Image: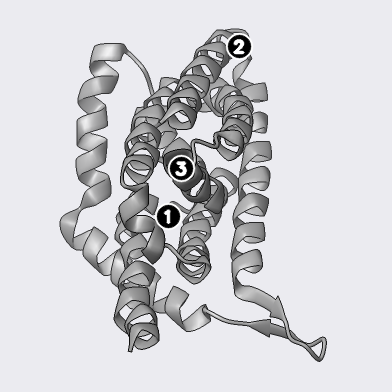
């Protein structure tokens, strides 16, 4: 779990640096930075979705796959998330913490940073390598990227970003510790399907930064389970059969 530990520490240190920078940023510049971050996050999400969905066939044609799964995942995820009122509950919990810490936008910073840091192949593959072979290279690289991102996000969104180190540590740490058991089931196809939905949520965050329309991203989190369920029900079972 060395790579995961370093990754979590990098996020914490980056967030602390971001907090120091935040104090010296005027409000008008902070708003401009948030818009710029929105563009960057939108591009990151779009790149992730297109990379996962598009492929080039042997005859040179561009093929797209996964659109229907994405549609179903977001619809079902939204239905479940709205029913469970995930965002409202999260905002309620963060509201208590905001009052204690005297910090604004804690929930927004936490959800945004968690999705940006957790979703993606680097975290999954890196944690598997960490647990299976002790190779920390991928997670060390991810740590450097997350460190810089944490500084930028915290400088505009505040202290909520620092708490994203917790789910990063839990998720990547669990993958590392269980690597020998789950590695046979984590295929490139599973990561691809998961990335299609995951990076779509990252895109939703980018839209929230740029537009006045509010997408309740936290209520879409159950959508992440749909590609995993689909894979094991229809793809993995078929391959085993």
Disc 1 element: loop
In the figure, 136 relative to 119: above or below?
Answer: above
The residue that label 1 is drawn on is 215
The residue that label 2 is drawn on is 21
Q: Which mark is residue 127?
A: 3
Pointer 1 or 3: first along the chain: 3
Q: Say whether residue 41 is left or right of residue 82.
A: right
Verify CB contact (< 8 Å) between mark 2 and mark 3. no
In the figure, 135 relative to 198: above or below?
Answer: above
Disc 2 element: helix
Relative image position of residue 38 (x, y in whole percent): 61, 43
Q: Say whether residue 11 is left or right of residue 74.
A: right
Pointer 2 or 3: first along the chain: 2
For the question of whether residue 105 can be seen, the reply is no
**Camera-nearest residue between 200 and 56:** 56
Label 2 – label 3 distance at C-alpha: 31 Å
**Camera-nearest residue between 151 and 31:** 151
Pointer 1 or 2: first along the chain: 2
Q: Residues within 10 Å of mark 3 (few under 14, many from 20)?
A: many
- The residue sitting at 67% across, 58% down in the picture is 47
Disc 3 element: helix
Relative image position of residue 155 (x, y in whole percent): 57, 20
Label 1 – label 2 distance at C-alpha: 28 Å
- The residue sitting at 59% across, 22% down in the picture is 151
Between marks 1 and 3 in the image, the one whose residue lies nearer the viewer: 3
């Amino acid at each position: 779990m060395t790579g995961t530990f370093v990754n979590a520490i990098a996020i914490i240190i980056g967030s602390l640096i971001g907090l120091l920078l935040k104090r010296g940023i005027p409000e008008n510049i902070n708003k401009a930075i948030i818009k710029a971050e929105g563009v960057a996050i939108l591009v990151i999400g779009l790149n992730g979705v297109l990379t996962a969905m598009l492929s080039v066939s042997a005859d040179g044609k561009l093929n797209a796959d996964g659109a229907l799964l994405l549609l179903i995942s977001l619809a079902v995820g939204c239905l479940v998330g709205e029913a469970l009122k995930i965002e409202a509950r999260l905002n309620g919990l963060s509201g208590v913490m905001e009052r204690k810490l005297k910090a604004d936008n804690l929930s927004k910073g936490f959800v945004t940073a968690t999705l940006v840091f957790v979703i993606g192949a680097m975290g999954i593959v890196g944690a598997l390598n960490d647990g299976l072979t002790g190779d920390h290279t991928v997670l060390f690289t991810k740590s450097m990227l997350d460190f810089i991102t944490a500084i930028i996000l915290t400088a505009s969104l505040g202290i909520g970003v620092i708490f994203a180190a917790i789910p990063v540590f839990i998720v990547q740490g669990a993958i590392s510790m269980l690597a020998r058991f789950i590695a046979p089931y984590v295929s490139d196809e599973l990561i691809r399907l998961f990335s299609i939905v995951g990076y779509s949520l990252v895109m939703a965050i980018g839209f929230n930064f740029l537009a006045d329309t509010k997408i309740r991203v936290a209520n879409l989190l159950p959508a992440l389970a749909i590609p995993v369920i689909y894979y094991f029900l229809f793809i993995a079972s078929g391959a085993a059969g």
